[in-house]
Image (cartoon, helix red, strand yellow):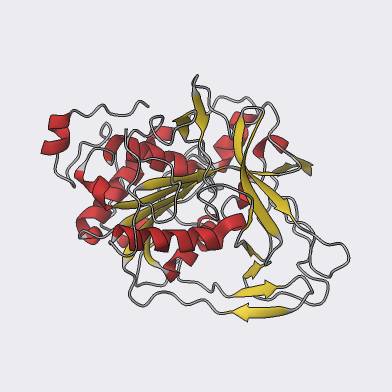
Amino acid sequence: MKSLIVSAFAIAAAPAFAQTPPPAAPAPDYAQDANWLCRPGRADACAVNLDTTVVQANGRTKVERFKAAKTAPFDCFYVYPTVSNDTTPNSDMIAGPEERQVAMAQAARFRAKCRVFAPLYRQVTLTALRQTMMGQTVALDRVLALRDVFEAWNDYLKRDNKGRGVVLIGHSQGSGVLKELIARYIEGYPIQRNIISAMLIGTNVAVPAGAAVGGDLKRLPLCTAAGQYGCVVTYVTFRADAPPPANSRFGKVATPGMVAGCVNPAALGGGKVVTDAIFTTAGAGMSSSPQPAWTSTGAVTTPFVKVPGLITAECTNRDGFNYLAVTTNGVPTDPRTDTIGGDVTNAGTILKDWGLHLVDMPVAMGNLVELADKQALAWRGVGLPVKPQRN
């Protein structure tokens, strides 16, 4: 799909909430709240227990109770990754346990700072992904996912936005859909002024080598400084001691002169830093390498766990790949785990070309939430905002 080429006249004339959608297809009615995975003010996949056990290096633990913001000053619009176990190439509009689980793991924690909106959409399923990886021909429809999210976005703008700032959040397939949404229907339109930032995690966002903007997105640059807003946070994750192999789909783009952007949410200006990692206690799921016990001194009973000082991360360039290199600072003599799960596996074999794709967000979840809040403050004129770089 090619991005729209929008003239200066069209930018000035197009109303913020009335854009031309992709070619007509039966679309879900997002005015029906049942077609949303998460909406504010109701009991759903995001209104769940997010209490977190903090496991120190000496094995001592304490529990942090999660509190959602009583009056959230900005919004978050979240599109989830490839999780559907439906047997069809594209999913249905019924939230299964996999959609609810990923919303809990990736989106719900943002409720500490923002109102969270997460549409259901007819995504390409895990079934289709597996068949494609096996070389089978699959009648999947990638455009259908974009059409659905476009309709959900317009419904959100009409019913809920009312001029509020919004952070776009996605992972994997969800990030790819949001990247297309931004390029086609946000950049160059008045609604761009309401975009606090776009967190496009687990996908490649192409930028010219040495530049922050001008590839996949023409107006929203990579975030490079504290206080900046109207910018993009993007990265793909690999272990520092297991860099991307030559066949990896992550961290490299095919367009000559372009590279995959990498923004460390814990250090926008670069450098190797400790991240505020927050993991689901049970690990990253069935397709992941298993998670060892978090500590040998007792059980962790909360849904989430923090491991202060265990994870450091740095945006790294190696062999033409740009990625977030994650180091686990394990100490064999203490009772806390020395490693984390998150590698994608098939029949017990680690697929090295996928890196730590399943924990792209958890390795820096606390940083992502705090960054969204700081960017929203800058967008509202609090503090000293840094103007985003333009073409």
Q: Is residue 356 left or right of residue 158?
A: right
Q: Residue lying at the far top in this picture: please name it.
A: 256
Q: Is residue 7 left or right of residue 358?
A: left
Q: Residue at x 45, y 31 (%)?
A: 207
Name which quarter of the figure residue 160 lies in.
bottom left
Residue 349 placed where, x, y %? 78, 40
Q: Is residue 229 left or right of residue 94?
A: left
- The image shows residue 132, relative to residue 156, as above or below, that is above
Q: Residue at x 76, y 70 (%)?
A: 57
Q: Residue at x 44, y 32 (%)?
A: 211
Name which quarter of the figure residue 390 lies in.
top left
Tally the marks: 0
Q: Residue lying at the far front in this picture: please name it.
A: 384
Q: Quadrant of the C terminus?
A: top left
Residue 97 visible in the displayed image: no
Residue 313 placed where, x, y %? 64, 51
Residue 348 visible in the displayed image: yes
Front-lying residue, 318 or 389:
389
Q: Residue lying at the far right in this picture: please name it.
A: 333
- The image shows residue 198, relative to residue 143, as above or below, that is below
Front-lying residue, 285 or 258:
258
Q: Quadrant of the N terminus?
A: top left
Front-lying residue, 115 or 264:
264
Residue 285 placed where, x, y %? 66, 55
Front-lying residue, 11 or 184:
11
Residue 223 placed where, x, y %? 43, 46
